[in-house]
Image (tube, rainbow, N blue to C red):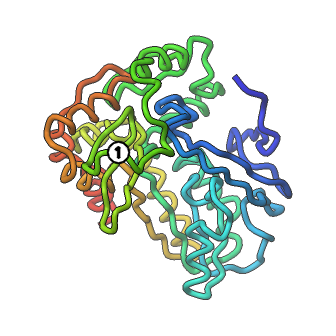
Amino acid sequence: LSAPDPRWIDSPRYKQRFRPNLNTVCEWQFGDIVRMGFIRPELSQGEKHRYPFQTDAEGFRNPTVRSKIDIAALGDSFTDAMTSPLEEGWPARLEQITGKKVQNYGTSAFGPQQELYVLQDYAIQHQPRNVILAFFAGNDLFDAEHFDRWEQADEKPGEETTGWRLPKRFRRYETLFLTTLARVALPAIGSQRTPAASLENRNPGPRFDRGIYEIPVRGGGILRFAVMPAYLQKLGSPRQEFERSRGWELTQATLLRMKETCDRAASRLTVMFVPAKAEVYWPLIEHSLGAEELQRAIDFSCRYNHMQLRAAEIQANRLAQNDLLHDFCA
């Protein structure tokens, strides 16, 4: 659907990763939720972002390779912070706060196995005292399965000729076409309603409008946000469903190998749990919307794969992955 991004290169070990020694810019206006078709562009304020994007000689988002570091930061897009200026990413913030040398080894779309390879191939040779792995609850278990199939079949999942396949373990397995998504999940009804920029005349009460939550805040402002439908739906999955998944099986084995690698180098491994936005914002959503409006918002998010979800399921299971990872680490 689009031309190849020259910032990426194919890799026999990682399958795909950043090109080393990049010196370019990153520019974008709409986030993933809009680009994937879940929210209409006219409903988003579409703020333009433009900033330098550089990688070091090892192919990671740092000004330079440092021979000795204090902390190695592993993870996916939440670590490399590709959609933000470098100084806004958590590795840069951590270095600023602590004064320690923190090297960013994150790469967007990486899963646990690729992060293990980064630890083995690059990070550990710089003798970090601490290794911090940012585990993203939104898709790391999915990415573990995704990469496992990629390694086994040497075919990138999601690029099959029949369309984009969703994993069965997270509520349903089907083939999804983006054109179908646009027609089914985003009907044209109400397309001429008030654009995102015209908020001053709206009802001050909390509301949900075609994927956008609008909640008044103290001082007269309005908090506007959206959540990724797949991540919201995953909050309804019970712990047992995660425990039985192939993704969790692969992730456990990978974390243990990370721990062994760190132990041999006298480094300390810390696993940092990064929740999806839907998990963080859910108590606010639940508190602000009435029962009928709340269920309407949930139903909107679930239209993309036609699976039902109830607020009670989210209430019961929202912290399932937190507890699962906590108990494993303990």
Q: How many marks?
A: 1
Where is 103 relative to 306, above or below?
A: below
Depth check, front residue: 209 or 30: 209
Instruction: Judge left or right: residue 283 versus residue 124.
Output: left
Depth check, front residue: 67 or 186: 186
Q: Which residue does the image show at 47% across and 14% down from the upper left? A: 183
Q: Position of residue 219 (x, y in %)?
A: 33, 68
Q: Position of residue 109 (x, y in %)?
A: 59, 44
Judged from the image, the secondary structure of the residue bearing numbered disc 1 is loop
Q: Which residue does the image show at 20% across and 45% down from the upper left? A: 289
Which image quarter is the C terminus in?
A: bottom left
Q: Which residue does the image show at 62% across and 61% down from the upper left? A: 119
Q: Amino acid at mark 1?
A: Arg
Q: Position of residue 259 (x, y in %)?
A: 48, 65
Q: Is residue 249 visible?
A: no
Query: Which residue is outermost to the top?
Result: 162
Query: According to the image, label 1 marks what residue?
Result: 202
Q: Residue 217, located in which quarter of the rendered image?
A: bottom left
Where is 153 relative to 98, above or below?
A: above
Q: Is residue 150 visible?
A: yes
Where is 112 relative to 292, above or below?
A: below
Q: Residue 241, located in which quarter of the rendered image?
A: top left
Q: Which residue does the image show at 24% across and 25% down from the upper left? A: 308
Which image quarter is the N terminus in?
A: top right
